[in-house]
Every structure is written in structure tokens, then in C-alpha cells.
Image (cartoon, helix red, strand yellow):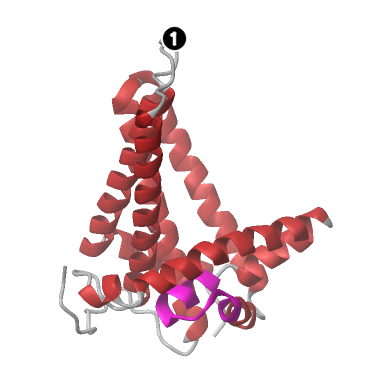
Amino acid sequence: MVFSIIDAMAEGFDRTRQRNGLLLAAIFAVLAVGNALVTRSTLGPMGTGEAPAGGLVTFGAGLLSIVLALATLVATIVALRTFVSDETETIPREFVRRNVGLVALNMLVGAIVFALVVALGSLFLLLPGLFLLVSLYYWGVFVAVENQNFVRAFRSSWALTRGSRLRLFGLGVAVLAIGLAVNAVVGLPALLIGGVFGLVLTQVAGAALTVYTLATTARAYEQLRHPERPIEPDRQPDLSGTPV
């Protein structure tokens, strides 16, 4: 079966609006708002003339930012595991606990290597960078879902995307266009509201886009892994696990 951009995007939207998709969006929103508020309190409110915080306050804020970043990384792992599965109502505890420390370490190191590889490819013109971006993009799913180390995950992503890279590039452009449109729609009201409420609005919209992107990535991965499987957006959950 030829990879379908529309099916991947439609399934991504369906999974985002399901109960566990909304729960994940709420978690990402809380983490994003928390991190934005920590950064705001450290740098000082813009335009007020107040000096940035210093000393112990800066240290504490930096430590809290690291904790929030790690929590966001774990939430990303859980989201990928959830969206690849058939679960739509609950998030099994197994998705949160299974080798999460080692997986998070591989995700962290792999993200740095991935960014460097794509950046190096882009130095030799834009096309090599885009080719590497599309070819290796699904490494994170292999790490989160199949517990592969990041090196093996790069190889797996390269093999997985073979023959579908142009369509996957189209999927990426489509998701990016949706993100730009949502940011444009939310940006003006957030600018007019200003202050903390404007900040919260932009972070909540960003969290929803993050979850949609992860859901679409996971469903595209599933479509590539199982090209013979029919698309069933209304499948009932069949994965056992203790919900959180």
C-alpha cells in the first residue's frame, strides 16, 4: 500500500481528540506554561525595567527548568508509545515505567546527534539536510516504542522511510503549515491580551500542536510498519495495561 498523507493526518487528529490525547495535551500545556513562567520570572517582566533575578533565584529557576525539560521528554516518550498503540481512553502504567530512564537518555543523546547530522547535511546545500531529516526522523519512535538505542534507531528509520521519503516530506510540510496557521490565529489574540494570559494561550496552543505532531508521527510510523493493515480510525482499545 502506498503511504497516505491524508490518512496519517486524519488518524493523528483523531488520536489527538481522544481522551488520552486530550490528557497528554493538558500535561504538555502545564509543563510548557510552567517553563515559560519560570523563564519569565528569571528574566524579569519584559518592558518593566526590572532587573533579571540573580543568585539563588536564578539557580533555583535553572534547576526547575531542567526538571520541566526532563518531564517533557518523558511525556514525549509516553505520547509516542500511546499513539502507536490502540489505546484511546487510558495510558497504561507500562508506557510510563518501561525502561524510561534508559530510553530518555537515548532520546536526549540521539536528539543532539540527529540535530548535528541534519545541520552538517544542510551545510552542503539544503537538499541533503532535508533528505537526512526525512530519512532519520522516525528514530525517536524506534527508541521510545521498541527500546532501541539511538544508533540502531537511525538505521531502522533509514530502512523504514525508504521508498516513501517524498510523501513523508509532504506530510512534514502539511503539519508545519497547520502549525503556522494555528500560531497565526492564536498569536494576535495573545498579543492583544498580553501578560500571563497571553503567555498561557500561546503555550496551550503550542502544546496541542505538539501532541498533534506526535500523534501524526506515530500513526505515520504505524502505517509504514504495517502497510497491509487497513486504516481503522475508530478501533477500540485492545492493549492490556493498568491505566494511570
Asked whether, in this view, residue 162 is left or right of residue 190, the answer is right
The image quadrant that residue 65 belongs to is top left
Asked whether, in this view, residue 66 is left or right of residue 227, the answer is left
- Residue 151 sits inside the magenta stretch: yes
Q: Nearer the viewer, residue 9 or 127?
A: 127
* Residue at 40 percent of width and 27 percent of height: 55
- Residue 5 sits inside the magenta stretch: no
* Residue at 42 percent of width and 73 percent of height: 102
Return the x and y of residue 94 as percentages of the image width and height. Answer: 25, 77
Question: Which quadrant of the figure contains the C terminus?
Answer: bottom left
Q: Name the residue under label 1.
A: 49
Q: Can residue 109 be seen in this view?
A: yes
State the extent of the magenta-drawn residues as a range: 139-153
Q: Which of 147 and 83 is in front in this view?
A: 147
Return the x and y of residue 140 as percentages of the image width and height. Answer: 50, 69
Q: Nearer the viewer, residue 52 or 148?
A: 52
Question: Which quadrant of the figure contains the N terminus?
Answer: bottom right
Asked whether, in this view, residue 219 is left or right of residue 79, the answer is right
* Residue at 44 percent of width and 65 percent of height: 216
Return the x and y of residue 90 as percentages of the image width and height. Answer: 19, 69
Return the x and y of residue 133 as percentages of the image width and height. Answer: 65, 63
Classified by dominant secondary structure, the portion drawn in magenta counts as: helix
Give the residue furthest to the top.
49
Up/down of 159 relative to 63, above or below: below
Say what secondary structure mark 1 lies in: loop
Give the residue furthest to the front.
55
* Residue at 61 percent of width and 76 percent of height: 154
